[in-house]
Image (cartoon, rainbow, N blue to C red):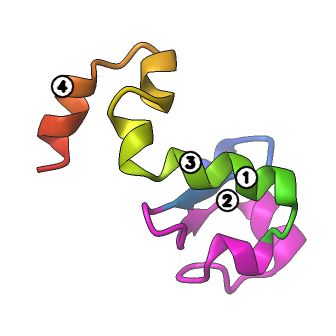
């Protein structure tokens, strides 16, 4: 499914490790991305500044997900 997207996509876990990527991303950065830290692949300070807060508990409870219309209580239940 990721390979059908027309732009490069990385799927990260909460520790910022790459879980999956699409063909466009692998064409740019090489085939061996899974398991690597996103910081080892993308070193852009603006990108990393945006990604790091999205992985904290603060982002899940009353932060990033609120801005996209998710209920923090549902997220907290999902993270148990």
Work out whether residue 4 or residue 31 is closer to the camera in this orientation and state it.
31
For disc 3, the marked residue is 53
| Residue 80 appears left or right of 15 | left
Query: Residue at the location (37% across, 26% down)?
Result: 62
Residue 31 location in percent, x, y?
Answer: 73, 82
C-alpha separation, residue under disc 1 versus residue under disc 2: 23 Å
What stretch of residues is rendered in magenta?
Answer: 13-41
Distance in Å between CA atoms under marks 1 and 4: 26 Å
Ranked by sequence position, the earlier of labels 3 and 2 is 2
Q: Cβ–Cβ below 8 Å for labels 1 and 4?
A: no
Question: Which element type, helix, strand or loop, lies under badge 3?
Answer: helix
Q: CA distance from mark 4 to mark 2?
A: 32 Å
Among the two numbered marks 4 and 2 on one chain, the one whose residue lies closer to the N terminus? 2
Q: Quadrant of residue 45?
A: bottom right
Could you say where residue 29 lies in the image, as x and y percent from the top left? 83, 75
Q: Is residue 64 left or right of residue 10?
A: left
Report, in whole angstroms, how far the alpha carbon at label 3 lies from the one at label 1. Answer: 7 Å
Vertical placement of residue 50 versus 69, above or below: below
Any part of residue 64 in sight: yes
Position of residue 3 relative to residue 63, above or below, is below
Q: Residue at x 67, y 44 (%)?
A: 4
Give the mark nearer the N terminus: 4 vs 3: 3
Which comes sooner in the sequence, label 1 or label 2? Answer: 2
- Residue 78 in the magenta stretch? The answer is no
Marking on residue 22: 2
- The residue wearing badge 4 is 73
* Discs 3/2, front: 3
Work out whether residue 42 or residue 33 is closer to the camera in this orientation and state it.
42
Residue that carries the numbered disc 1 in the rendered image: 49
Say which of 27 and 16 sits in front: 16
Dot 4 crowding, Cα within 10 Å, few <14, some 14–19, many 20+: few
Q: Using the numbered discs, state the Cα–Cα distance from disc 4 to disc 3 in whole angstroms.
A: 19 Å
């Amino acid at each position: 499914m990721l390979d059908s997207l027309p732009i490069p996509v990385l799927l990260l876990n909460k520790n910022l490790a790459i879980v999956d990527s699409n063909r466009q991303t692998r064409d740019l950065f090489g085939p061996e991305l899974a398991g690597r830290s996103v910081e080892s692949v993308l070193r852009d300070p603006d990108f990393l500044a945006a990604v790091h807060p999205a992985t904290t508990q603060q982002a899940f409870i009353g932060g990033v997900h609120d801005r996209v219309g998710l209920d923090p209580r549902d997220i907290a239940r999902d993270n148990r």
